[in-house]
Amino acid sequence: MSDRDRIGGLVPKVTVVFKELGCGFKCPFCDVWANDASDAPPDLTELSDAVQTLLEGQKQQDVLECVLSGPEPLASPVFFKVLAAARRLGYANIRLNTNGIRLADRALTQQLARCGIRGVDIPVYGSNAKLHDRMTGMAGSFILLMKAIDNLRNCPGIRIEVVHTVILKQNLRDLSKLCARTKDLGLPKLEIWMPFARPSANELSRLRDICPSLTDVGKALRRIPSEFYRFLGMPLCLCPPQVPLGVSLRGFQYARKCQGCTMRAACVGVRESYLLLYGDKELRPFR
C-alpha cells in the first residue's frame, strides 16, 4: 500500500524495486553504491517472471497504481519487460522513480511515454549545478537533470508527478533557494525528506556526518513560503505552524517521551535512526 499522501487520501499501489544495478550517483545519504553485493545476482528471466506474478497478485486487490523504482529502474535489462507487463495488466497509473539523468535523452523519454509511463518522480539536491553535482558525486548531473525536466515537460502523455530532495547538513542552507528554483521551473511542490539509516554503528556514524537536527530544519522551513513545499516525517511538536506535512509512515516510531501526548494519533513520530542519533530531547509533547 502507498505511504504517500495523495489527493483524496491514500492510493493503493504496488512498487517494483529493481535492485540489480545502482543509479550511478554517490549520494552521501545512500549506501547502495558503497556496499558491495555479497550475493550472486538473480537470474533476470526469473526476476522478470516473479515481478509479473507480483503485479498480477496485487491487481486482484484493486491496486490501480504501479511504481517502478530501484536504485535506478532504467538501468535494468528487464525494465521494459516489466513495464509491458504492468501495462498489459491495466494499471491506471504507471509511475517511474528515477534519478532523471537518462531522461536527458529525448528519444528515451518519448519511448517511455509510448510504453505507458504516465508519471515520473525525480530528485533535485541543490539549486545550482555546483551543489547538486557535489551531492550526487557526478559532474554534469545537474545539467542532465535540467535537460530531462525540459524533455518531460515537452513530451505529451507523461508528466512530472513528484520532485523530492533529501535535506542534509550539506544543503540545508540552500533549501529556500531550492524551493524557489523548483517553483520557478513550474515543478510540483518540492517534497522534503530527512535521511535515515539502519540502526547499526557504521550506519549511524555515516548519518551523524550528514543529518541535521529537526530543530534546525524547522528553523529553515519557517523562512520558506508553505506553498513551495511539503515535508515528510516531521513530528507535530517540532513542526512550525505553517509547514505542510505529507504522510511518511515506514520506519517511524514514538519515543517514550511521546506517551500521553494529546496529538499522538495525528503524528507520524520520529525515525528510529534519528532517535538513536539525537535522542528525544528536542521533542515537546502536547499535554
Image (cartoon, rainbow, N blue to C red):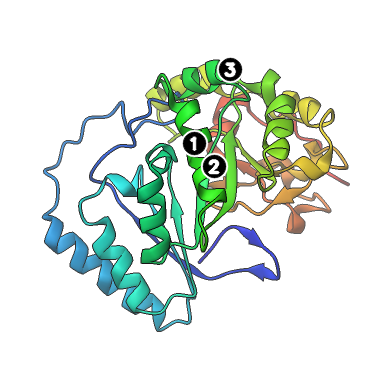
Residue toward you, 230 or 82: 82
Q: Quadrant of residue 21?
A: top left
The disc placed on residue 234 is none
From this view, report whether residue 17 is shown above or below residue 91.
Answer: above
- In what element is the residue under mark 3? loop
In the rendered image, the vertical position of residue 212 relative to residue 275, given as above or below: above
Report the residue marked by disc 3.
170
Instruction: For label 3, count other residues whose C-alpha is less than 10 Å away and answer few (under 14), some (14-19) or many (20+).
Output: some
Residue 243 visible in the shown view: no
* Amino acid at pointer 3: Gln
Would residue 198 be visible to someone looking at this image?
yes
Q: Earlier in the sequence, mark 2 or mark 3?
A: 2
Pointer 1 with pointer 2, Cβ within 8 A: yes
Position above or below: 91 against 241: below
Residue located beneath label 1 in the image? 147
- Sort mark 1 into few (<14), some (14-19) or many (20+) by Cα contacts within 10 Å: some
Residue drawn 50% across the image and 67% down it: 1
Q: Secondary structure at mark 1?
A: helix
